[in-house]
Amino acid sequence: MSKLSYLEVKNISIELGEFKLKDINLKVKKGDYLTIIGPTGSGKSILLETIAGFYKPKLGKIYLAGEDITNLPPEKRKMSIVYQDYMLFPHMTAFENIAYGLKKKIKSKEEIEKRIKEICEILNITHILKRNVKTLSGGEQQRVALARALVIEPEVLLLDEPFSALDVKTKENLRNLVKKAVKEYGTTVIHITHDFEDVWSLADRVAVMKGGGILQEGSVEEIFYKPSVNFVAEFVGTNVLKGEVIGKDENGLTLIKVGDTVVKSVDMGNGDVLISIRPEDVVVFYGEKRCKVKNIRRRGEVVEITLDLGGETLRSLLTPNMLKTLNVEDEVSISVDPNSVRIIKSLKQKISYKN
Ligand SMILES: Nc1ncnc2c1ncn2[C@@H]1O[C@H](COP(=O)(O)OP(=O)(O)O)[C@@H](O)[C@H]1O
Ligand SMILES: [Mg+2]
């Protein structure tokens, strides 16, 4: 069996009232970690639940390890699903919750206990196993839910915004634990999230959904640095600018004129091009003045600076410390690592860059 087609969603279409999933295609390799991102209502949960077997597609097939599982009931799919709101059995202890599904699959008491011990050690919940789950904190409850999902050693773990209800610190802790656990078991994961930190720290691949379809699927770097449509660029916060290739520098880097400024890129290209620049890769300083500060906005731990490069707009993310003296209407220079300036496409062929 080829590793490429381990979990394959092929031309899946589904109608639920007004909502449609349209011709979904996905291939997930064994042991890979796929995150699904996209706005609320784009069909992420419906797709996940279709993979889990809760919805029957109108068209299309789902394969796991080469086997057609499209018509298998959820309990026969070797998959586990974990939701944002834990969904634990409320009147049971943590141990009983974790053992519940496992007991149906395995009869040996020793094997059950061995498996539970193993996953609880990884997820660091051995000390709370006797507690009623109602008395546990959100982070503890979610670790119990994850243990319950992983203890049956599923082929595929499906996560629907599992960290959304947790505080930043607990989230970071759970991220690390999930990473460790799925690595240990070699589990293939599909994880819906709104948090790009999940994507950066967990994902091998990313799919971006909108309006019941997948707009782009790729590596984390491809999604963030080479968005294929405007919607993806905007959704992941990447700058997309028009530029013109004007030559090469002494190191072979491509020189691209953007508005009144020139940036360097590791990518090759010629003529009019569309380029992407991640906002966190733009450094702003007082130097040869070519850009104007149009807006300064505090965004949590960082500050977003909107710059006018002479017709083209570029956003930069800086630490607050860096801009104590920066004001709107100031003229500044920018510096961007050539590795962060990526040519998305040449505009010579008049390919439209639209959604
Ligand atoms: N069982 C259902 N029947 C009809 N419509 C549904 C059902 N479940 C969800 N929807 C609708 O389908 C759309 C996509 O839902 P969902 O997959 O939950 O979005 P997401 O998870 O991306 O936020 C939403 O507009 C939602 O209201
Ligand atoms: Mg959802």
Image (cartoon, helix red, strand yellow):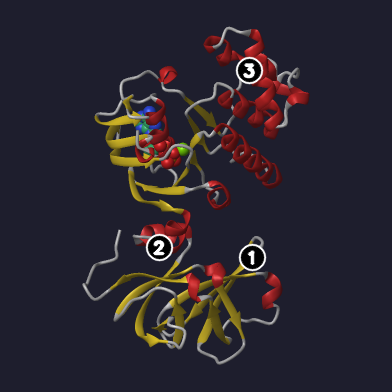
Q: CA distance from mark 1 to mark 3?
A: 41 Å
Seen at 54% across and 24% down, the residue is 153
Q: Would you place residue 205 above or below residue 163 in this image?
A: below
Q: Give the structural element (helix, strand or loop) at label 2.
A: loop
Residue receiving disc 1: 302
- Depth check, mark 2 against mark 1: the one in front is 2
Q: Which residue is mark 2?
A: 226
Task: Please state which of the two labelled residues, at mark 1 or mark 3, is closer to the viewer.
Answer: 3
> Can you say which quadrant of the picture contains the C terminus?
bottom left
Placement of the N terminus among the 4 image quadrants: top left
Quadrant of the rendered image containing residue 87: top right
Q: Amino acid at mark 3?
A: Asn
Question: Tag 2: residue type?
Answer: Lys
Mark sitting on residue 97: 3
* Image coords of residue 309 (percent x, y): 46, 83
Callout 1: SS: strand
Q: Disc 2 vs disc 1: Cβ atoms closer than 8 Å?
A: no
Front-lying residue, 94 or 249: 249
- On screen, residue 43 versus residue 137, left or right, reads left
Dot 2 alpha-carbon crowd within 10 angstroms: few under 14, some 14 to 19, many 20 or more: many
